[in-house]
Every structure is written in C-alpha cells, then in structure tokens.
Amino acid sequence: MSDLFAFNGARGAGWSQPLPLIDKEVLISAIPAKLRRQNLPKWPRASEPEIVRHYTWLSNRNFGIDNGFYPLGSCTMKHNPRVNEKIVQLPGMDKIHPLQPDHHVQGLLAIYFEMQEMLAVCSGMDQVTLQPVAGAQGEFTAIRCIQEYHRQRGQGHRSKVIVPDSAHGTNPASASMCGYDIIEIPSGEDGRLDIDALKSAVGEDTAAMMITNPSTLGVFEHQIAEATEIVHSAGGQMYYDGANFNAIIGKTDPGRMGFDAVHYNLHKTFSQPHGGGGPGSGPIGVKSHLSQFLPTPIAGRREKIESDPKGVDDGYWYFWEDVGDSSIGKVQQWNGNAGAVVRSWAFYRRYGKELEKMSEHAVLNANYLRHKIMNPDPEIAEKIHVMPLNGAPADLVMHEFTLSLSPLKELHGVTGKDVAKRLLDYGVMAPTLYFPMIVPECLMIEPTETESKEVLDKFASDFHQILSEDPDIITSAPHTTDVKRVDEVWAARNLILKHPGNNSN
Ligand SMILES: *Cc1c(COP(=O)(O)O)cnc(C)c1O
C-alpha cells in the first residue's frame, strides 16, 4: 500500500508533493479497501529543467504587476509585499482545515478578529464580516442585510435602489439580484453627483442608494453629507462601494459621511495578488442597526477563562460566533478567503498608524501624473481631454483620473482602445478602458502609491510619444506582444478554451 505515495520525491520527477501530515498507514486504513487505488495514477513525469522551463514560459506570456507599470483605474493593481507571502505560508495558516475546532486555530481567529476590528475602525462602522470573497459579493450581502432591515420594520414595500450613472456595473447588478429596481441618476456638469437629480429620485419606495466616494472619475463627492441626509430622510439606507477606499483611508471614512453599510475590496485597498478574475476578498462593515443581519459566523473574542483550552497568549480566547436568528445566512462556504484576509492583515499591520500615508502617496501620484499628461506640447494637447469634462484644469483628483481621447478619434480616427493596445508595446499595462461609461473614449488611470517619479515620468512621455505617432501604427498595435491584435467578435463567436500546448501560438 505504501507505494501509493511512491510519487513523493520519485526519482526523475522535477516536482514533489507536500508530505502528508498524517501517518500514511493511518490515512490508508481510513479508506475502505474496495475504494483504494490499485495502481499509481498516471502523473506526468518531467524533469526539473522541463518543469522550470514550462512555468517560466507560462509566466513570460503574461503581463503582471511584477513585469511593469499597471495603472488599472478602479480595479487598483497594487504591489504585493513579499513578506505577506511568507506570513500566509506559515504552517499555522497554510496547513489548517476549516473544520478544525476553535482551540486549534486561535492564531487565525485572532487575525480574523483583529482584521474585523481594524476595518471597522478605519471605515467608521460597528461590525464587520470577512465572509464575502469579492467586492461584488459584498455588495450583494450588504444589500440583502438592508433588505431584511426594511422588512423587519414593516417597510418591505421599498423596492428601488438609486445609483449614479458613474457607478460600477456591479452596483446595479447586485441590487437587482436582490430583486430591486434600479434608478440611475445622471451626474452633474462636473462629473459629480447631481443633488437635484437625487432629490427627485428619492421617495417612499427608496430602499437604498449605492455610491462610491471618490467617484469612478476620481473626484471627491463633496456633497456627500447632503446626499446622505436626503436619502435618510426618505427612509432609505446609504451604501458605500469601497473600491476607492485606497484614496481616503486615515483621512476620512464612510461612517463619518453618514453611510450605513460598506464593502472593502481587500485586494484593491490592502494586499492580495489579483487580476484576471483572481482571488479577492470583499468583507462588509455595517452600523449597529444592521449587524444582526450579517452572515454568520464572525470571529468573536472574550477574556480567557480557566475551563477553556489554551488560547493565544494575549489573555483572550477567540471563537466562531453566530450572529443570531435574523442573520441572512451564509454567503460563502467556510469562512471566506482566509489567504486574502491574512495577507491584507499583514499589510495593514505593517503600515499601522502610518496607513494614511498610503492614501497620501496614491493621491499625490495620481495628481502628478495627471498634471504631466495634461500639459504636453501644444500639438499633442489638442488630442486629449482630461476629465472631469467641465472641471477647472486645476481641479484636484483623488487616487485616479480619467481622460477622454474623443478629440484624437475625431482628428485621426484613433480610438481609446488603439492607444491602450499601443501602450502594451511600450511595456506597460493598458489602463482601464471605456469605464466609467459617461466619458467618451475613456482611459482611466490609477498609478497607486508605490510607483516612483521616474516610472510616472516615463509613462507620461511614452503616452505623449504614442499620440504623435503615425495613426496606422497605433491602430494596428500591439506589435511586440505574444498575441497580436485579436478580432474580438471572432474570438467571442469561436471560443477556443483548450490549451494549445507548449511552443505553439
Ligand atoms: C472593482 C470594483 C467593484 C467590484 O469589486 P470586485 O472585487 O471586482 O467584485 C465595485 N465597484 C467598483 C468601483 C470597483 O472598482
């Protein structure tokens, strides 16, 4: 039977499986004889050089934050400090199972508890759950809590959720998954929330308003307190989309702005490698009137008492706690994306009280880059339009900004997409494209806090260089990447989902 494990470290294989923590014989005897494998599986056999080449080849075909500048507006691609990886791979994190009893996992529970507390403090909320695994799922979870809140108060008839037209598509999608009708309100001339439009949208049927601040245009909604007042006096709840939390952390918080519920994108504000739909974490925080509706369990803490098994050494005992009968239930198996929570906790702990410096640098970098890009040679200046459309040029942005390439399109037939593709040839990732939808030929640029002045200067000069190139070069880009310009319609109609294998294109 022990040859079941013969592939561990087998000669000629360039890989190894982690050794089982449990005694092999014990493990095998736990499996009924008729279910036991008679032959070894047909594992691929490849030498170490072959394995190394394969993964290096794969990694080179991709573009990531470790290859170059990645100014993806809204979705925030931040540097992931390597120390987080060390921490998340400690055996106490990496080798535990979600069904282990509380007294086995005091370390992880302590981290969960601390993360809940830290998120609550920096957002001005009363209670946090770490369960949702994406911002979008956090939106859904919080809107469900708001829905239960209304129902419990005999206000179940409230059927409408208000979103500005600059909102991320997940906002209306989440609300509509909860069964709400969406009322979209137009933005004002300066790209900000139009208070009059909001006034005429609220009513007896308003369940909530969902909004991000700073908005997806990168501008701070300075009338947010007034907006909150309007929605609250109509009996609605205020929901804060935390995707842009990176811009304000330590400076102000959604609680102070009057919000009742918020989601955090740990992968955008703190740390967790993401992208391409990769792993995320979207905890939510709520004010106390909503906390009884949160999904369950959350991490709890009380002083250690004699009869308890050993806890961690800070005199407290941590446990998984049920929220109670009003809970909307679970939204995710187990306890959310523990890896993302631990990485973000490590990131947060490293900044500590200095966390607001992160926002300061993110905002400084965005304003510096915006200023550089919008002040080029005069013949280039006519090709771009920096948003907000009617904002004064000196207007400050927060952590990101948008610009419109519609002048370029009118002059030379070159679109925002063409410029985005051409940027790939210069070794940077294309910024977010065609979002928010209220900006024509939109590029949305978010440099993040860790980029140096040299990187930003280079990006601005590459960008200006592209705008002065022959339009044919731009419209046929990219020229240097593994995959050249793709025919998107063709690709969507003829999906190829099978891996083409090594060496082929
Ligand atoms: C990214 C984003 C979301 C959704 O978050 P996910 O974690 O991707 O599900 C919502 N709103 C805004 C403004 C975003 O940028």
Image (cartoon, rainbow, N blue to C red):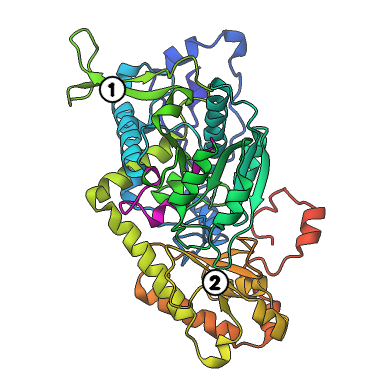
Residue at the (50%, 32%) spot, across then down: 7
Q: Nearer the viewer, mark 1 or mark 2?
A: 2
User: Circle 1 — which element?
Assistant: strand
Is disc 2's CB within 8 Å of ligand 1? no
Which portion, as a residue range, is magenta? 235-255
Expressed as whole percent of the image width and height from the top left, the position of residue 127 reads 38, 31
Q: Answer with left or right where residue 6 lies relative to residue 343.
A: right
* Three-letter code for the amino acid on which mark 1 is drawn: Arg
Residue 494 higher or lower than 176, as above or below: below
Q: Nearer the viewer, residue 381 or 73?
A: 381
Residue at the (42%, 68%) spot, across then down: 366
Q: Nearer the viewer, residue 290 or 246?
A: 290
* Three-letter code for the amino acid on which mark 2 is drawn: Met
The quadrant holding residue 315 is top left
Residue hosting label 2: 387
Residue at the (66%, 34%) spot, across then down: 159
Residue 251 higher or lower than 467, as above or below: above
Residue 47 higher or lower than 307, as above or below: below
Is residue 170 at all visible to an observer of this figure? no
Q: Answer with left or right where residue 22 lies relative to residue 31.
A: left
Badge 2: how crowded within 10 Å, few (<14), some, or many (20+)? many
Is residue 245 at all visible to an observer of this figure? yes
Q: Nearer the viewer, residue 381 or 6?
A: 381
Q: How many marks?
A: 2
User: Circle 2 — which element?
Assistant: loop
Q: Quadrant of the C terminus?
A: bottom right
Numbered mark located on residue 317 in the image: none
Numbered mark located on residue 301 in the image: 1
